Amino acid sequence: MSEKTYGILAEFDSPAAILRAAEKVRDAGYSRWDVFTPFPIHGMDKVMGLKNSLVGWVALFMGGGAFLSVVGLIWFSNAFDYPLIVGGKPMFSVPMTFVPSYIMMILGAAVGALIGMLAFNELPRFHHPLFTSERFALVSRDKFCLLVGSTDPKFSETETRKLLESIGGAHIEIIED
């Protein structure tokens, strides 16, 4: 066994059981825990205290930056660096810059969403400690698992195991990193 404990995993049989267990773990004061289910469970995000993702803000920042960069590049090129008078048209015109800036804004936002998603999900990660558990493979079929991470300030192998047993957790196992 490795000397680094990743957490303690408990298995539950129904959506109602995992929802009740999540409430008990939250009420016990744990902050670094997660739930794994074969399908979304209504109300779980509220129980877990999940907030909106920051990926949207990264996409907004990257899209806005791309938009302003293209507008700035067009202004610099046409009005300052290489002014070229064509048919009496102005050196810089907002309608002229909108289409390429808008296209780059969409591209920048898409790239920002991808980068934000990868960063906030800590990807790419080629190996996850949960993949060593044979019981965890059942989550993709019909089982529900709750993991309390060892990085939680309240984590104690004995106390956490007792809590998971008391709330109806089955097949409780220690996951090693």
Image: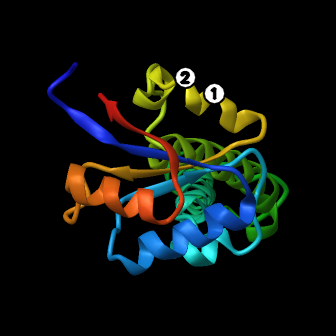
| Disc 2 residue crowd, few under 14, some 14–19, many 20+, Cα 10 Å | few
Residue with the mark numbered 1: 137
The reply to whether residue 79 is visible in this rendering is no
Q: Secondary structure at mark 1?
A: helix
Q: Quadrant of the C terminus?
A: top left
Q: Quadrant of the N terminus?
A: top left
Q: Position of residue 147 (x, y in %)?
A: 45, 49
Residue nearest the observer in this picture, 33 or 111 = 33
- Residue 125 position (above or below residue 55): above
Q: How is the image coloured?
A: rainbow
The reply to whether residue 155 is visible in this rendering is yes
Residue nearest the observer in this picture, 20 or 45 = 20
Q: Position of residue 114 (x, y in %)?
A: 61, 42
Task: Inspect the image, locate mark 2, and give the three-letter code of the amino acid beneath it.
Answer: Glu
Q: Secondary structure at mark 2?
A: loop
- Residue 19 position (above or below residue 3): below
Q: Position of residue 28 (x, y in %)?
A: 35, 76
Q: Residue at x 57, y 32 (%)?
A: 136
> Which labelled disc corresponds to residue 129?
none
88 relative position to 74: left or right? right
Residue nearest the observer in this picture, 103 or 18 = 18
Q: Residue at x 69, y 55 (%)?
A: 105
Q: Residue at x 72, y 67 (%)?
A: 16
Residue with the mark numbered 2: 134
CB under 8 Å between discs 1 and 2 = yes
The image quadrant of residue 20 is: bottom right
Residue nearest the observer in this picture, 145 or 41 = 145
Task: Inspect the image, locate mark 1, and give the three-letter code of the amino acid beneath it.
Answer: Ala
